[in-house]
Amino acid sequence: MSTFIKDFIEREKMSRRNFLFASAAGLTSAAVVGPWSATTAHAGSHGGWSMAWSYRDRASAYWNAIVSGGEAYVESLGMSASDMTNLINEGSSEKSLADIKAFLAKNGGKGAIACDANDSPNARPVVEAVREAGGYISTIWNKTDDLHPWDIGDNYVAHLSWSGEKPSEDAARLLFDKMGGKGGVVHIGGIPANIPAIERLNGLKKALNDYPDVELLDVQSADWDTTKAAEVMSSLMTRYGDDIKGVHCANDNMAYGVIEALKAEGITDMPITAFDGNPEAVDLVMKGDLLATVFTNPHWGGGIALALAHQAAIGAFKPSEEPNAHREFYGPSILVTPDDAAEFKATYLESTPTYDWSDRWGLSAGQIQY
Amino acid sequence: MPIIVLLVLVVFFTSINSNFFSLRNFARIAIAASPFLMVAVGVTFIILMGSIDLSMEGAVSLTAVTFCFCFLFFGGTLASGGWIAIGAALLAGALYGALNGFIHAKLMIPSFMSSLAMGFVGIGATVLLTGGGIVRIDDDIFRSLLTYRLQGFPLMVYVAGFFLVVGILIQKFTILGRNLYAIGGAEDLAAASGVPVKRTRILAFSLAGFYYALAGILQVAKLGQAESVTGANLMFLSITAAVVGGVALWGAIGGVFNALIGVLIVAVINNGMVVIGLPDYLQDGVLGLLVIVAVILSTNRSSIRFVK
């Protein structure tokens, strides 16, 4: 609990600082540089470039891991984590843009930034502002499909995203193999309109093409929720009974509900796959209650996004000389199965691996497809 | 009338998929309905007074997490002393309800606002306790509430049934129960006749909190875990269930038994929609429409003069 409160206070401090940045954005750049130059002269000035991560907030385990990756990169340069500026947009696209402009103005344009632009339309004004100021930026998750780093130039270094489709397909293949390549399967999905929910269902459908004897009996939404998933699963047992030979869930939380609903029926050997790679799910994989879950390595994603922007800024590589697959790429995903769950837990959950940030695309899962 | 609505629904779903009418499916509906019934019984006491309680989601999450932490603290099994956690969670629920009632009655804040705010406080406290994580209980004896069956139904269904009967007895045979109707019918007259209105209100909210804690414990029995969203969706479902069952929001009409029928109606609709194969994107809309139809059919509107 104490770390929670500490984190909270830390976040609040950052928000206040960003509020000052945001209000400063309306002033001239000269006025902005003045008051802060004394306190931030040392901050993140490796190679003369200051570094920042712009994101919503740090409250979830996922975003905490993203930002810790950025901090790990900064530390790998021999600086301290606090040398990376946290630009917290609190879910506001306007604040996201204003913070970035203020950060660049303060550093005379010499800023290397990693950013989730909060919503897709905001990515274009953000990267254009960075280009005008002469800074460098990588984005993750949010951008419109018609915006590409190679159209903007070297200042827009790269975009990183994750596809739910391929890992979900891999999990489905594992599930079908475990079912012996035949029988009925049900999909417990997220909120139907959510992009990850759509992608994860599409992954399952793709895998089905190669397994003619596996039948998708039903797709039911459980809104990412454990309780609802338990109820939906038990209702599906009434409808399909023993025809259900496997369950494909769109996230870990719903899989917990499915496991409990089946436990109530005395069924403990049903193969079930999940998604997210949460610690509890990994434990369930180790116990054999869950066949697999998918981990997307947010720590590496957060680190490499900042590393690419900074390395382009200091001239370690020239983005326009790289192929498109290095400018827009998917982050990695790891299928956690009973065979490797213990090793996975030791490597990724109980400790954090040290990455070689100069291996820029080593974990890339290929160019983004539209 | 509400019972007829329930029977019509059962016949309707059975006619489309005969699997619906089976002991195994009734057990599944009962498992889903057990925690939910405890919340509906709790809020019925409040609705009878003509007030409303919107704190149940926070109360259920908080008591479920309290239960899990206590359970783990006392050894993590029922045999090692985990039973103390049951008392601790029920006490926490009652105290939470008492505070809710105190803020409403003594500080003179409308129950809608005070209870909604207390609900947020409960969820906030749960996030603080868990740090946003999940607390798991892995004790086979405790989980036998879900896994051990008598006559086809898990033990937790009998626990819920027992406290349902307790609720009916409180409503019918205690002074508190009669006072709820007196306040809901005409608060001024009740006060003039010597009913201790404020004390009754605080007691009623404490009783509701006790029932929310029961729901929290049954939720853990059902899912083996607690987190800040353990109580999610219960606010809409429980108030809907009470109203569908014939407990009128203007107070003093209906009772705990109506809440039971309402819970069964909502649980049957939720289960039946999946069992007959209704696509998931239609289910929310159909649930809403069926609720309106059920309220029209099940409320005795001849006994009221106006609706606010």
Image: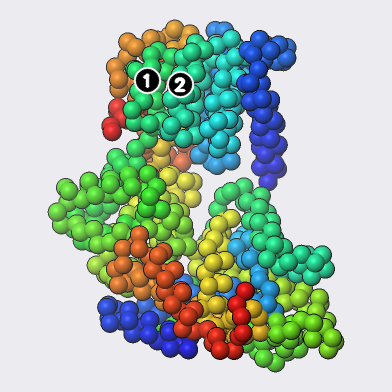
Q: Residue at x 38, y 17 (%)?
A: A152
Q: Residue at x 65, y 64 (%)?
A: B55
* Front-lying residue, B93 or A96: A96
* Alpha carbon separation for disc pair 1 and 2: 9 Å
Graded by Cα atoms within 10 Å as few (under 14), some (14 to 19) or many (20 or more), the crowding at tag 2 reads: many
Relative to A194, is B250 above or below?
A: below
Q: Residue at x 43, y 14 (%)?
A: A155
In the rendering, at what x and y percent does residue A58 appear?
Answer: 58, 37
The residue pinned by badge 1 equals: A149
User: Quick check: can you spot residue B154?
Assistant: no
Relative to B23, is A106 above or below?
A: above
The residue pinned by badge 2 equals: A127
Rendered image quadrant of residue B96: bottom right
Q: Do callouts 1 and 2 mark residues in contact (Cβ within 8 Å)?
A: yes
Q: Identify residue type, mark 1.
A: Pro
Q: Is residue A306 left or right of residue B254?
A: left
